[in-house]
Amino acid sequence: MSRTNLRSFFVFAPFAASLAAQSLTISEGNLAFTTGAPAMTSHAPPTADLRSDALATDHAFQHGWYYRVAGDTREFALRDIGPTSGGVTAFLTHADRDFADVDNRGLFRAAWDLDGYATGPASGVVTSRLTVLNTSATNLTIDLFAYTDLDIAGTHANDTATGNGVRHVVSDWTGVQIELVGVGADRSDVLVHPGVLDLLTDTDIDDLGNNQPPFTGDYTGAFQWSAQTLPPGGQRSFTLILAVDTPATAVPEVEAYGRGSHTGCEIYTDTLPLQDHSGLRQIGIHLTGGVPFALVGLLSSTQALPGVPFAGLELWVESQSGPVQFSIGTLNGSGYTQYVFPIPASPYLTGFPIYHQYFYADPGVPAGASHSGALLTRLGRL
Ligand SMILES: [Ca+2]
Ligand SMILES: [Ca+2]
Ligand SMILES: [Ca+2]
């Protein structure tokens, strides 16, 4: 069973069949982000609304992800082609837009996760995270692009930007300031609309031109992660942060890495590892695609491993040194479980990484056990 189907079953059951083509809205307090339906055929990015105050002023026009596989002759938007699904969790701060077989190419699946939280009555953070998983039998080399068109305070001709190649701070005369960070990106661009969009939607190959702020005009920007190579079954996350009137310096991070025994098995979270002195927050680490009713264990520690072979498995999380927790239980009848951790509010833990990997009994393989890929969660704070 694919990630898409499983997520639909557990969280989005009433909407699964029809929601892929609808807009999705996440919110907390006055912070709200909406992504429009992905295009059916064109390479236009989804519409976007980004609001953070009591007046619900909209600062965004479009935001979306693009890709180019090595050998392709152009960039492609993530479109409503192939099996897609989407939904918003009951607690409203998380949305999924999942592409189980991007463009029906049989190469990779993409899970787009949107998370948001308010940091005050007129400020907040949205993270836009794309996780790519190589479902093919050979190495996949791929470029990813995160494109954003902001129109601060709803006007488009008078925006300014400062920053550098991984960070654009966009503002206008109203003083509203939105910081975009392409975490770990190696190329970027900022140009007057539609300069960046043309690069990503025309019919040839373009890398971003590394035009950097300062900038004045109708802001559009993009970040690029170049030539990312994933082995068969390998996964990796790419994140764009949008911080409205708050510094993007202690933002919680989630990143999938490594690979599981089966591409249908997935570890994920639908919450952010966020410290909040005003109330206890939790993070849930989920597994889907395991063996129904099997014994399961979640290994959590402060250090990663590079896929160390062990008894027919691959270890992506350190288990022999440092603080380690191994939570055990059983999967349900759909091969799913989750463990929920409270997040201590201690500011000393900001930036603290925890790496997670699931293991479960699997009579269908020689090792007698299978495992998920791995997930990094790094604590941020309000
Ligand atoms: Ca808008
Ligand atoms: Ca192009
Ligand atoms: Ca703009």
Image (tube, rainbow, N blue to C red):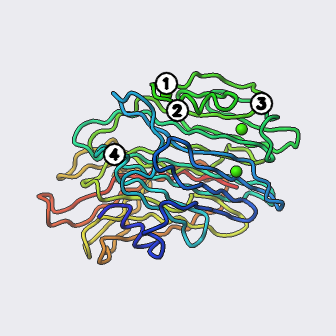
Residue matched to label 2: 200
Circle 2: element type: helix
On residue 108, the disc is: 4
Q: Nearer the viewer, residue 213 or 296?
A: 213
Of labels 3 and 2, earlier in sequence is 2
Circle 3: element type: strand
Q: Nearer the viewer, residue 32 or 79?
A: 79
Q: Nearer the viewer, residue 56 or 228?
A: 56
How far apart marks 3 and 2 lie (CA) works out to 20 Å
How far apart marks 3 and 4 lie (CA) works out to 37 Å
Please rate how many residues cluster around mark 1, counting C-alpha atoms within 10 Å: few if below 14, some from 14 to 19, many from 20.
some
Asked if ligand 2 lies within 8 A of label 1, the reply is yes
Image-based side of 251 in relation to 372, left or right: right
Q: Nearer the viewer, mark 2 or mark 4?
A: 2
Asked if ligand 3 lies within 8 A of label 3, the reply is no
Q: Nearer the viewer, mark 1 or mark 4?
A: 1
Circle 4: element type: strand
Residue matched to label 1: 206
User: Marks 1 and 2: CB-CB under 8 Å?
Assistant: yes
